[in-house]
Image (cartoon, rainbow, N blue to C red):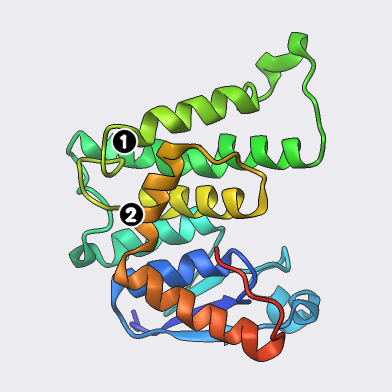
Amino acid sequence: MSDDLILYTHPMSRGRIVRWMLEEVGRPYRAEILDFTALKQPAYLGINPMGKVPALRHGESVVTECAAILAYLADAFPDAGLAPPPGIAERGAYYRWLFFAAGPVEAAVLNTALGVDVPPERKGMAGYGSMAEVLDTLEGAVSGTEYLAGGRFSAADLYLGSHLGWGMQFGTIPRRPAFEAYVGRLYGRPAALRASEIDDGLVAASNPAGHVRA
């Protein structure tokens, strides 16, 4: 397989998460910066029929969805140490929190932001239960430990930390001391700073008033 890595992204999208991951991986990659209007055009729909970013091409493989891209990269480049190896207990925690962020966290935050209230008698139908339960579970996960899986930074931290940081910045997740301490550790990583500088620079170049940080 070719080692060529191509990130399809926009600097004000979840593609910022994948750029951070690529900076952690430390392999050369090329970023295709797409205007949002281009996402529904045939050229890009051939890569992601959903017409959204990010997407990753690695040789002949195309991967979409942030959590899937992060898991793929961690396994494709094990020397980067971004996932506990298969067969050890920490691998379970890694999967648990990576996909907790992709499932319950995303759903709870979006529904709350949209004002969708799950009736108490139907709470069992919602995979996340309630926003309060999700937040308390997250607080327990990031309290008293530096990282989520085995005391070492992993793609699960990158993904969950991105959600917490973005949510606190835009008010969709309340600020809690444990969240702020956890995100502060992650955002100070050299790869996170490099990725943010690249995407912030792209935002500034296209819209000087439009800085964001994922």
Q: Amino acid at mark 2?
A: Arg
Q: Which type of secondary structure does the marked residue at label 2 adopt?
A: helix
Location of the C terminus by quadrant is bottom right
Compared with 208, 57 (above or below) is above
Task: Report if the CB atoms under discs 2 and 1 are less than 8 Å apart.
Answer: no
Q: Quadrant of residue 28?
A: bottom left
Q: Sequence-wise, which precedes: disc 2 or disc 1?
A: 1
Compared with 68, 8 (above or below) is below
Q: Residues within 10 Å of mark 1 (few under 14, many from 20)?
A: some
Residue beneath disc 1: 93
Compared with 195, 160 (above or below) is above
Residue 187 falls left or right of residue 107: left
Q: Residue at x 72, y 85 (%)?
A: 207
Residue beneath disc 2: 185
| Percent of width and height locating residue 108 | 65, 34
Q: Amino acid at mark 1?
A: Ala
| Percent of width and height locating residue 63 | 51, 65
Closer to viewer: mark 2 or mark 1:
2
Q: Residue at x 20, y 40 (%)?
A: 150
Residue 1 falls left or right of residue 123: left
Location of the N terminus by quadrant is bottom left
Look at the image and tell me whether residue 102 can be seen.
yes
Residue 191 falls left or right of residue 151: right
